[in-house]
Structure formats: structure tokens, C-alpha cells
Amino acid sequence: MADPHGTTRSLDDAIELGDEPGRWQRGLAVIAGIGLVAALGQAAMAEDGWRRFMLAYLVAFAFVLSLSLGAMFFVLLQHVCRAGWSVLVRRPIEAMAANMPVVALLFVPIALSVVLGGGEVFPWAQRGEPAASAAEVAPASQAQAEAEAAGAADRAELYPHQTLDDFTLKKRPYLNEPMFILRWIAFLAIWGGIGWWYWRQSTLQDGDGDAGRTARMEKWSGILLLVYGLTVTFAAFDLLMSLNPHWYSTIFGVYYFSGAAMAVVAAWILMLMLLQSRGYLATSVTVEHYHDLGKFLFGFVFFWGYIAFSQYMLLWYASLPEVLGWMQHRGLSTDPAHVEVFGSWAILALVLLVGHFLMPFAGLMSRHAKRVRGVLAVWAIWLLVMHYADMLWLVMPEFGPRLTLGLVEVGLAVAVGCVFLIGVVRRGARAALAPRRDPRLEESLGFENF
Amino acid sequence: MAENRPERGPVYAMIAEYANVTAAVRAAKQVREAGYTRWDLHSPFPIHGVHKVLGMRPTILPWLTLGGGLIGLLGGLLLVWWTNATMFEGVPTTLQGYPYIVSGKPQFSLPANIAIIFETTVLLAALATVFGVFALNGMPMLYNPLFKSRRFRRVTEDRFFILIDGEDAKFDPRWTRQFLESLDPLSIEQVHLDELEEEESS
């Protein structure tokens, strides 16, 4: 579009990361190490620490996976609608979407726990009679044995899905170790392929300026979004829904996706702000780009709330016995007997309702909130924390009726997050920070919200 | 030339014609600097960033949308409460609520009602936006004196026009014309109210 000031803006700021990424990676590696040691330390001392460690690891993994998947969604989305405004800011999410090899590496502990472990993460992956395993632990005294048997009985009553009953066994043809591993190899290969191909086309275009690459990326984006939607849905079923094999919710894949899309916009905004504060893309990325990213953030905040409520309402309305357990464990029951036991998860559920939906919805509604950098940054950080809280709320109620948030959870989130970021920085450093020869770059540089 | 024609009622506006965006926007800046407040720039297509040149204030439309949404929210809440959970004496039967237990849920239970409340919120917010746009733009407007100008027809094709309202405090047929001439237009034309005159006086 014509510019009333008679000037055409060009991409003339710094878009090459110099030797900074090396320093960043070393810093991130140190932080990751500290986080891991802290988590291991507390897990070693805590009761049932290994199980807690693995579940907390799953929380952290679900978080970073959602960032890569969310980024992949936005890369595909920009191409499927031939977006012009976002060209300038597309590279950071291309790097995040192409970070699947690191995500695959981070998946290895979960795969190992499924193959070698005894169902400490997924109840369907346990072997033998779970009731017997409680008795196998050599008790020091008769009284202790009775107490432990009573404890196991209590637990089986509170968490019926964690014993291998008929219900779970019926799902074994799908939820079994080899199938799980095969599915995840397929998921990670498909996502890895998509992320890599888009990264490669976009960065090769930096060199040859071939507009045909843009055409090819657009051509494939539609069908790949379909593939993306199906794989994300089934991956969410595997990774998070199967924690409770009794429970099912067909909307759950969308629930995971909605949080992922919201979180990645927050991460996207923060990455751009960090780069700009370091002098990269300092003048070319303007408040207009942040305004549009803010709109995405606002939209996906509401989308998450909409989906979360849709899931809740149907479960609440139908009140099917086999799905109520999942809700009770997460504090979604107002029955006083449940509130007494699971009350601390109810508090987290309310925090999510207010902090993940109502507050940011009201706070991001105004145009000004999206155009004032500081305000947008605060919401982005806040929503990343809320997305982590959402993942915690999905996974950790499986560990026990009391809210667990300590060094194990925080340490692992920091460690896994830093490893993920090392991958993003490594990849990002290999190319320019903006697709400098994209045919729509000029449109993006001159972009203004009307 | 316009000034040779007989006067045909009050002046509606004076328009200056330009051939391209750059010239029109440059002139617009000077109109604003000269202190005119009731003036406009007409263009065949949206010019990005022109609102800064025109000194347009932010629209109140978002507040209308918010107001509509809030009314829809409260109205929807009232509707589901009244129809599902009340039975008052003295209310005519046709307006009476109909308390009925569905699926063992309480008569007034928020989760079941949110879907309705959400829809009425969206509906009234959307209606407030659409009719707000109409109202703020003075629509429906079936006639505009500018339609009389043959030159102005090209504003939907390839011409740009700066318009200074006849009711602007600084407007003076002679001085405004002189001022516009200093801005290098292709042409200047004075548009009269004509037929609108009758309606204006009533």
C-alpha cells in the first residue's frame, strides 16, 4: 500500500546474530543443569519421588512440545492465508517449529519410562497385578503392613483408574507400549519433517530469493494443517488424556492445541522483544506488528476459555461415572467430600479460570493494551506461566490429592525449557533473523493497522 | 467555472482535486496546519496511516460494542433466570417462568446457562457494532450534495479530493479558494446544498 509520508521502509537493521548465541547457550546450559540437580535432589528425598519426578517431567515436556507445535501451527497458518504482515516476524517461530529434533530428544525419558518402567507415568503401561506390588514391599512390622495395605486400598478407591481393571484392559489394543512408541515415532517424524522443510525453504530463499519457494510453502500448507490437526489430537490423547485411561474427551486434542497456540504467541512476542532489546530488528519491527500479535494472543486466550468451558460443560452435563473421576481429581467437583480431599486442585482450577481466561480476556481486550509494549510483555509472561499451570493441572493430580509444586516441578520446567531454548537459539543463529528476500517482505515492513 | 454560475443556495463545501496520493496527502497536511477543522480527504482506496494526517480521533465504536456486549450478557442472564428458575405470583401466565428440572441439574445452574449468555453477548455486541457504524457515519444517507459534482465521480476511480466544509469556522468562499489554489490542485469546485435546502430549513 502507498505510504502517505512518501518513504519506503527497508530492512536495514541488524538481522545476523553474531557470536552472542554461544554465550546464551552456555548460560542456558548452566541454568538447565542447576534446574535438573535441584529437581533430582528434591525428588530423591521426597516420598514416591521417582514417580513425581517423571510426572513433573511430563508437565515440562508437554509445555515445550506445545511451544514447538504452536509455532508450527502459526507457520502453516501464515502460509495458508498468504499473510503479508507477518513475514518480518516469521523467522523466530520457524526456528521454534524446526526444533523438533530437540523435542524428540526430550521425549526419550518418557519413552523409556513406558518401555522399561512400571507404569509410573501411564497406568496402562503397568505390568502384572498392581495390588500385589503394594504387598511386595517388605514391611518392617505387622502394623506398618496393615497401614500400607490400607493406604493402597485408599489410593485404589481414590484413583480407580490407576489399577489395571477391565476398563483399562479393554483399551490395551490401543494403549500398549509398542503401539505408543510407534505412534510417537510417527508423530515426531511428521512434525520434524514439516518443521524442517519450512525452515529449509525459508532460509534457502534468503540466498536465492526464489519466489517459487513461497508458492510451494503455500501450496502444501493446507494439507499439512490437516495432518497437523490429526497428529496433535492423537498425540494429546496419548500424552495427557491416557494418564487416566478411564477418562475420555473428544475435544481434548483441541484443548491442548488451544493452550499451545496461546502460549506460542506469548513466547513469540517475548522473543521479538528480547531480540529488539539486544539491538536486532530494532527499527523494522514496530508497534504495528506487536498489535497484530496481541490480537492473536487475545483471540487464543478466548479460544482456550471457550474450549475449556465446552469440555467442562459436556462432562458436567452428562455426568458419566467413568469420566467424573478425572474431574474430581482436578477439583472440578463441588461435592463437599471431594472438596475436602482435592480442594487444593480446585484452587488451581479457579486460578486457571481467572488467570488463564477472565483476567487476560479483559486485560487484552483494549487496543491500547496491545500497543503498549510493557503491558503486552507482562501479559505474555503471565500467560506463559498460566500455560505451565494448565499443564500442571492436567498431569499432577495423578500424583496425589494435594497440589504439588516444588523444586521438582519448577526445576524440571526450567531445565527442560532451557534445553528447548538452546535448540531454538542454535537453529536461529544459523540464518538471518528475518526472511530477507521473501516476496512479501516489503508489505510486512510497511504494515500498519488501520 | 463555478463562480460564473448563479448562486444556488448555501455552500456545502469546496473541493480540490488531485491526481495522486502523494499530492493529496501533502495538501491535506497543509489544510490541517492552516487550522481548518471540518474537512476531509476522499480517496478511491484506503491510504494507510492517513488518519494521522487527518488528525482523526479514535472512534467510540469499541465502547458501543462493549456496551452492547454487557447488555447482552446481563439480558441473557436475566432471560435464563426468569424463564428457567422463577415463578412469581401476579405475573400473567404468558410472561411467567417455567421452572423445570433438566438432567437433575439445579434450576438455575451457571454452566448450563453460559452457552445462552455467551450467544446473547455476542449477538448484542455485533448488533451494537453494526448499527454503531451506521449511526456514527450518519447512515442511511440517501443523498449527498457531492453527488451533484461531475468531477467528484472520479473519486471512485483515480482521483483524490480534499473537501473543506462550508460550515467550518475558517471557511470563506474567497479566502478558502485562494488557499486551496496555493495547494496546487488540478481543479477547485464549490458544491452547493441545492435540494437539501428545503430539508435543512424544516
Image (tube, coloured by chain):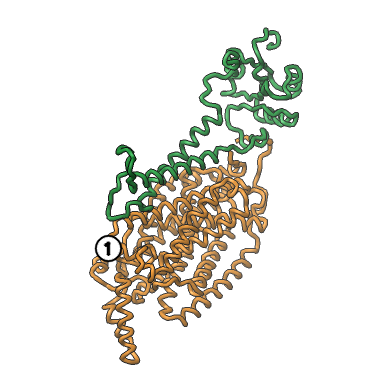
Quarter holding residue A58: bottom left
The amino acid at mark 1 is Pro
Is residue A181 visible in the rendered image? The answer is no
In the image, residue A73 above or below residue A344: above
> Which secondary structure, mark 1?
helix
Chain letter for the orange colouring in the rendering: A
Please report the residue visible at 30 percent of the width from the left and 45 percent of the height from the top: B98
The chain containing the residue under callout 1 comes to A
Chain letter for the green colouring in the rendering: B
Please report the residue visible at 47 percent of the width from the left and 40 percent of the height from the top: B125
Quarter holding residue B30: top right
Is B109 positioned to the left or the right of A106 in the image? left
User: Farthest residue in the bottom direction?
Assistant: A141
In the image, residue A445 above or below residue A47: above
User: Farthest residue in the front direction?
Assistant: B90
Residue A367 appears at what percent x and percent y? 58, 45
Q: Which residue does the numbered mark 1 point to in the structure image?
A: A321
Of the pair A413 and B74, the residue shown nearer to us: B74
Residue B111 appears at what percent x and percent y? 37, 53
Quarter occupied by the C terminus of chain A:
top right
Please report the residue visible at 59 percent of the width from the left and 60 percent of the height from the top: A429
Please report the residue visible at 40 percent of the width from the left and 76 percent of the height from the top: A51
Of the pair A93 and B28, the residue shown nearer to us: B28
